[in-house]
Structures are given as C-alpha cells and as structure tokens.
Image (cartoon, rainbow, N blue to C red):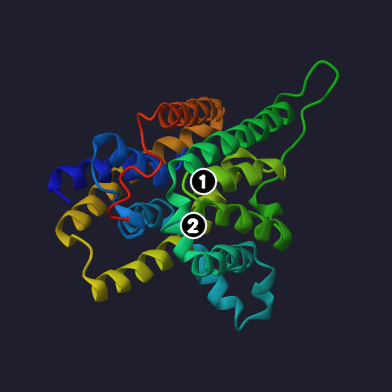
Amino acid sequence: MSWFESLILGLVQGLTEFLPVSSSAHLRLTAAFAGWEDPGAAFTAITQIGTETAVLIYFRKDIARIISAWCRSLTNKAMRSDHDAQMGWLVIIGSIPIGVLGVTLKDQIEGPFRDLRITATTLIVMGIILGVADRLAARDETGGKHRAAKERKSLQDLSVKDGLIYGICQAMALVPGVSRSGATISGGLLMGYTREAAARYSFLLAIPAVLASGAFELKDASEGGHVSWGPTVFATIIAFLVGYAVIAWFMKFITTKSFMPFVYYRILLGILIIVLVSMGALSPHAAESAG
C-alpha cells in the first residue's frame, strides 16, 4: 500500500465510520474503483482504532462517568440502581453478540462476505430499513392531523432486552455494506428511541467491539507481518482527525434533520454497484487480491 492510498483510505474511514453508510463498504469500493488492492479486514479493523479513539475523546465525560459508576457498583449495592452503572452493564451485554459472531464468522468476514454483490444488497436493504425507521420516528415527533406527537424513549429507558437487541443489530455490521451505526440506529429508532439516544448508544456500544477487533487484528498482523505498518498507522491518524470532526457534526445534524439523505445515498450506491457488476464493468471480486 502506498502513502497516497493510505491517505485516501484514511479519509474515507474517518468520513464514513460514524455515518450510516458503511465504512467497510466504502473502503472496499474506493479500492475497487481506484484499481487498488483490497485493504483487507485487518486494515479496516486497525484504522477503526483511530476513529474509535475519536469517540473516546468526544464522549470522554460520559465514558468516565459510566466507568466510575460501574466500578463502584461492583462493591456498593446502592450504586447498582444508578443509570450510569447500569449503562456500563448494558454496553457489556450489547457487546456479546458481535464478539461471538465476530470470532465464529471470521473466515466468512474476510472472504465471501466481501463480494460486491453482497455489499450492494446490504446497502439497499439496510437503507430501506433505515428509511422506514426514520419515517416512524418523524411521525412520532411531529404527530399529524388526527394524531398527537408521541414521546420517544431516551437512554434512561434503556433495558437489558433493548440493549441486547442493539447488540444484535450491531453484529449485523460484520457484513460489509450494513453499517455499524446504521444498523444500531435503525434498531434504536424501531424500538422507539430518539435519534440522539439511538446514535449516542450506538457510538458507546461500538467502543468495546472496535477496540477488541483492532487489538485482535494487531496481534495477527504483528505475527503474520502482512500489514504495511507505516501507511496503516498514517491512515489511522487521518481517520482519527477526520472522524472526530464528523462525530461533532453528526451529533448536531441528527437533532434537527432526518436520515433520509443517507437512505437515498445508500440505495443509489447499491443500485450503481449492481448495474456495474451486471454490465461487467466491475468485477464482484474487484480489489480482493490482498484480502
């Protein structure tokens, strides 16, 4: 991998990680359209450490509060009813599905799941689901002629069942094209949470999964020596800087705007990929040589 490739891929990772459009799909597509080798699952996991570091810094007060309350609740029974302590447990519970499936489906994630036809399909299907979820949220927020506005749930209402459902939604992002944030936010909206609550928990829930995945890939890469460390570290730094700016913008955007622009984008991109593959202009296995 060249330094220029790492720059572009780092920008793509930072721009798309927190938006409901799938960063893994965009990394793969960028390589395919540019005629580069597939950056591979290891590159994706390692550069996600950069974007997840942006999450740690942006939500540092929330994270510090949750960790502190959770640790105290281990020895202080009175703390176990504290919302922040419960959030610590809910993040742990929500991380179980992706941890189990990530290990179980590792070979498929790095192989068959990277077929561009699968990516295109998941872009479209998850785009439609996000659109439906967004419309339901908008209907509750605005009400209508014969319907009063309905109050949606906040993170204070998060239960063990909902946390586990969030986790199952996050696990779907193991397939390129699904989008971690898109799947968890869609799940949250369908369960009746506000856009801001769904996005905030989505970002917090991603921390253990992404850091564990990155550490796992770092170990494998160190032992196997199949990663270009200089360009990969450079891409990770770029992803961190861009990712932090995107988080700040996205959290403000969702308080007043809908997700429909992302829905249209996902569907159009998915259709474009299917058309290009069908016409033979793009191989469904393009850029897979380094996968």
Q: Is residue 64 visible?
A: no
**Which residue matches tag 2?**
206
- Give the crowd class for mark 1: few <14, some 14-19, many >=20 residues within 10 Å: many
Rendering coords of residue 17 (x, y %): 40, 45
Work out whether 280 lies above or below 89.
above
Query: In terms of image quadrants, where is residue 75?
Result: bottom right
Rendering coords of residue 254 (x, y %): 53, 33
Q: Disc 2 or 1, which lies upstream in sequence?
A: 1
Name the outermost residue toward the top: 145
- Total residue callouts: 2
Q: Quadrant of the C terminus?
A: bottom left
- Give the crowd class for mark 2: few <14, some 14-19, many >=20 residues within 10 Å: many
What amino acid does circle 1 point to? Ser
**Which residue matches tag 1?**
181
Work out whether 234 lies above or below 74.
above
What amino acid does circle 2 point to? Ala
Give SS at disc 2.
helix
Name the outermost residue toward the right: 146
Name the outermost residue toward the bottom: 75
Q: Nearer the viewer, residue 59 or 241?
A: 241
Q: Nearer the viewer, residue 186 or 244?
A: 186
Rendering coords of residue 194 (x, y %): 64, 40
Q: Is residue 239 visible?
A: yes
**Numbered label attached to residue 130:** none
Left or right position of 155 against 28: right
Q: Are marks 2 and 1 in contact (CB under 8 Å)?
A: yes
Give SS at disc 1.
helix
